[in-house]
Amino acid sequence: NINFKANNKKVLGFCASRNDISRQQIIQAEENRLIRVRGLDINKILDYKYRDLLIKKEAAKISNYFKKNNIMIIQKISKQNYKDLNLKILRIFKQIVKNLNCWGSVDRLILIGGDTSFSVLNALDTETIKILGSIMPGIDYGVIYDGKLKGTKFLIKGGSVGNINSLVNMINF
């Protein structure tokens, strides 16, 4: 049972992007034992009659995994024949965020993708962030000024931004 942690920082990340480079970056970070990936089965959630219950159960599992590991939450999807699929994925991410009970333990928040970032920050009741700088072109870091993670450091990048080691660099920053 290997714990995935980076420099004793508790890192929680979100990526709803379906961009190939984001996927490669996540695989690289997991192979470097910096994060564990928790894939949300979007098809199962969308097709399940008791969707809210399933989301609450998934959020409880993620909160429990986060006690021992850094976690990157991604979307897994096999069939894509849903109307407004991207909006539905973002709504699911938002519901997961609202149901997580691990916010007091988060040292760093990592956000991949513009729409993902907006949805997660909105679900955290965050209206104000401050960008402090850049660790690489297109990858910024800063502080959350309000909401559930007030005072927490975050790193943010677009889904198509960076090279294969970008997420590793974000986690280790």
Image (cartoon, helix red, strand yellow):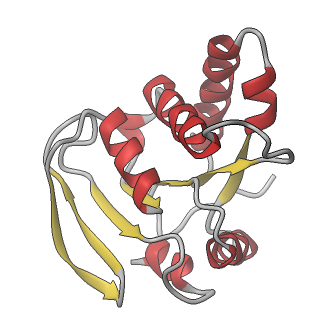
- Furthest toward the front, the residue is 83
Q: Give me the residue at 68% from left, 20% from top.
A: 57
Residue 25 higher or lower than 99, as above or below = below
Residue at position x 47%, y 26% in the image:
101
Identify whether 107 is placed above or below 93. Answer: below
Q: Nearer the viewer, residue 120 or 135?
A: 120
Q: Quadrant of residue 142?
A: bottom left
Q: Is residue 38 above or below residue 140?
A: above
What percent of the width, then of the height, locates residue 45? 73, 27
Q: Position of residue 167 (x, y in %)?
A: 54, 76
Q: Quadrant of the C terminus?
A: bottom left
Check the image and report above or below for 19 versus 37. Answer: below
Q: Nearest the camera: 38 or 103?
A: 38
Q: Residue furthest right?
A: 78
Give the mark count: 0
Left or right: where 129 falls relative to 88: left
As rendered, which of 134 and 85 lies closer to the eye?
85
Quadrant in the picture for residue 108: bottom left
Q: Residue at left 27%, top 41%?
A: 149
Q: Is residue 29 left or right of residue 9?
A: right
The picture places residue 115, in percent across and down from the top left corner, at 43, 53
Instruction: Identify the residue at image location x=81%, y=29%.
Output: 44
